[in-house]
Image (spheres, grey):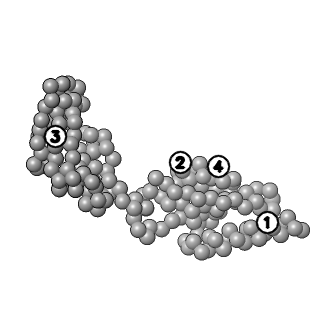
Amino acid sequence: MRTTRTANAKVRDGGWQTFSTVAPPKLHWATATCAKVNCPKLERGWDVRIDESMTLGRLCADYIRRVTNRRGWVEAKDPSGVTTFTFQPGTPCFQDHRDGRAQGVFQVPPHKRKVVGAPSLYIVSDGNAGAVSKQLTTTGRPASLIRQHTRGADWVEHLAESWNNMADAVNN
């Protein structure tokens, strides 16, 4: 999840400068354990229902029976051939970041937690907001970077100066 905010300022030559703050996911989100994200499965327990008549189902069930290090699960089969594995409270789920193999087998993303105090990027670039926002979303950086401020206050001051210059150009 990337957070991008943009504002445009038209410059004297008719072009645009785009002011953006960007919160790159690599800086603002970290993988986490069930305990760190208060995973409800860890607190209440959880079930996994698997249809073992399919190849993927057999692989998943085999992973739980032979590979997983989780203890205390109970296995039950219903008449239709679906196996239910019930995990007791206190058992981390398959999204716990310490179990990368399970995430691959079950195709689930790891838990993520927001990193408190992670720095945003304060960017000034050439071009209109739509084009720059698309560049930031796909690459994390605009193609035509004019300046990257290290402090948000400097970025706000730059934006205010640009708006003042634009107002002066309109009024003169």
Apparent side of residue 48 relative to residue 144 in the rendered image (left or right) = left
Query: In the displayed structure, would residue 52 be above or below residue 69?
Result: above
Image quarter where the C terminus lies is: bottom right
Residue type (three-letter) at the residue carrying disc 2: Thr
* Other-residue count near label 2 (Cα within 10 Å), few / some / many at <14 / 14–19 / ≥20: few
Apparent side of residue 137 relative to residue 43 in the rendered image (left or right) = right
Q: Earlier in the sequence, mark 3 or mark 1?
A: 3
Q: Are marks 2 and 4 in contact (CB under 8 Å)?
A: no
Q: Earlier in the sequence, mark 4 or mark 1?
A: 4
Q: Position of residue 54 (x, y in %)?
A: 23, 26
Could one spot residue 54 in this view of the protein? Answer: yes
- Residue at mark 3: 85
Query: Regarding mark 2 in the picture, which secondary structure is present there?
Result: helix
* Other-residue count near label 1 (Cα within 10 Å), few / some / many at <14 / 14–19 / ≥20: some
Query: Regarding mark 4 in the picture, which secondary structure is present there?
Result: helix
Q: Earlier in the sequence, mark 2 or mark 1?
A: 2
Residue type (three-letter) at the residue carrying disc 1: Met
- Residue at mark 2: 138
* Other-residue count near label 4 (Cα within 10 Å), few / some / many at <14 / 14–19 / ≥20: few
- Residue at mark 1: 166
Q: Earlier in the sequence, mark 4 or mark 3?
A: 3
- Residue at mark 4: 131
Residue type (three-letter) at the residue carrying disc 3: Phe
